[in-house]
């Protein structure tokens, strides 16, 4: 494992992508920064963090053993690796808010941004960006955010948490390489936030509706049972879970 430590960068994902353009890089290359000037989240959202309080890093993963239509298994494996790590640090009441936000006690503590490298219609690599709130205590204007420190009262060693996440990513990616897709999917679905509970959603037009989260498809679509009993699939741009 190669770890590149930066004081500051615009985005650890962008840094890894540029590095890979210059020279092919090894599986498990990690870039971690004390601060990001343009940290990114899902669908163009901004990830903000206090300097040196949290973990902001990206991991380069060789995923050439997966086909393009299996890309969501990268997200599932990453989510499970983070859950396994946080459980080892006794973080309470963990769940995955689809597709890959990590919650504790209904508060968001971690976000993941996955950007795949595709060549000639084949999946080659994945750059997995992780933003984990670790020791930050102030989340002004973000009532649904928390950190490991706020949840437990402990101050955490950032390097220790980082290395544990990367080790657990290796653990779950070996599962994928062995073709144990259903096992990964079953565990992921069992950890879904608000699974089988009455929930309120908002669609792309801003209209609200009720339903029950049942599962995800292999392509990563959220499968929701609507009031008429029909199960409908939604992608990330089509639906927001309100909670």
Image (cartoon, rainbow, N blue to C red):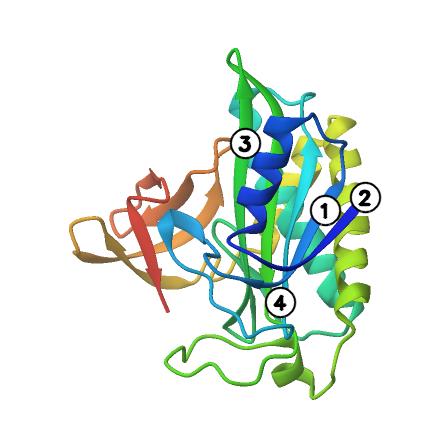
Q: Which residue is mark 4?
A: 94
Residue at x 32% of width, y 39% of height:
232
Q: Which residue is mark 3?
A: 116
Say which label, 2 or 1, has the lower sequence index: 2
Q: Quadrant of the N terminus?
A: top right
Label 1 to label 4, Cα distance in Å?
Answer: 25 Å
Which element type, helix, strand or loop, lies under badge 1? strand
Res. 35 image quadrant: bottom right
- Residue 237 lies, in percent from the top left, at 31, 44
Say which label, 3 or 2, has the lower sequence index: 2
Which element type, helix, strand or loop, lies under badge 2? loop
- Residue 138 lies, in percent from the top left, at 51, 85
Q: Which residue is mark 2?
A: 2
Label 3 to label 2, Cα distance in Å?
Answer: 20 Å
Side (left or right) of 125 relative to 221: right
Q: Which residue is mark 1?
A: 30
């Amino acid at each position: 494992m190669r770890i590149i430590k930066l004081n500051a960068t615009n985005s650890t994902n962008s840094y890894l992508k540029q590095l890979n353009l210059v020279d092919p890089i090894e599986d498990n290359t990690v870039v971690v920064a004390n601060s990001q000037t343009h940290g990114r989240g899902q669908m163009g959202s901004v990830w903000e963090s206090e300097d040196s309080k949290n973990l902001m890093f990206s991991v380069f993963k060789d995923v050439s053993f997966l086909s393009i239509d299996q890309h969501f298994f990268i997200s599932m494996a990453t989510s499970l690796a983070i859950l396994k790590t946080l459980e080892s640090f006794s973080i309470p009441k963990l769940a995955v808010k689809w597709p890959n936000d990590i919650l504790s006690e209904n508060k968001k503590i971690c976000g993941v941004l996955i950007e795949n490298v595709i060549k000639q219609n084949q999946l080659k690599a994945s750059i997995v960006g992780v933003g984990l709130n670790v020791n930050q205590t102030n989340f002004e204007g973000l009532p649904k955010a928390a950190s490991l420190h706020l949840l437990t009262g402990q101050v955490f060693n950032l390097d220790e948490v980082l290395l544990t996440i990367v080790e657990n990513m290796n653990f779950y990616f070996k599962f994928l390489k062995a073709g144990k897709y259903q096992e990964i999917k079953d565990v992921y679905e069992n950890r879904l936030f608000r699974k089988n509970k009455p929930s309120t959603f908002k669609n792309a037009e801003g209209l609200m509706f009720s339903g029950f989260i049942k599962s995800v498809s292999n392509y990563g679509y959220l499968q929701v049972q609507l009031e008429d009993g029909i199960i409908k699939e939604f992608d990330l741009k089509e639906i927001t879970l309100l909670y």
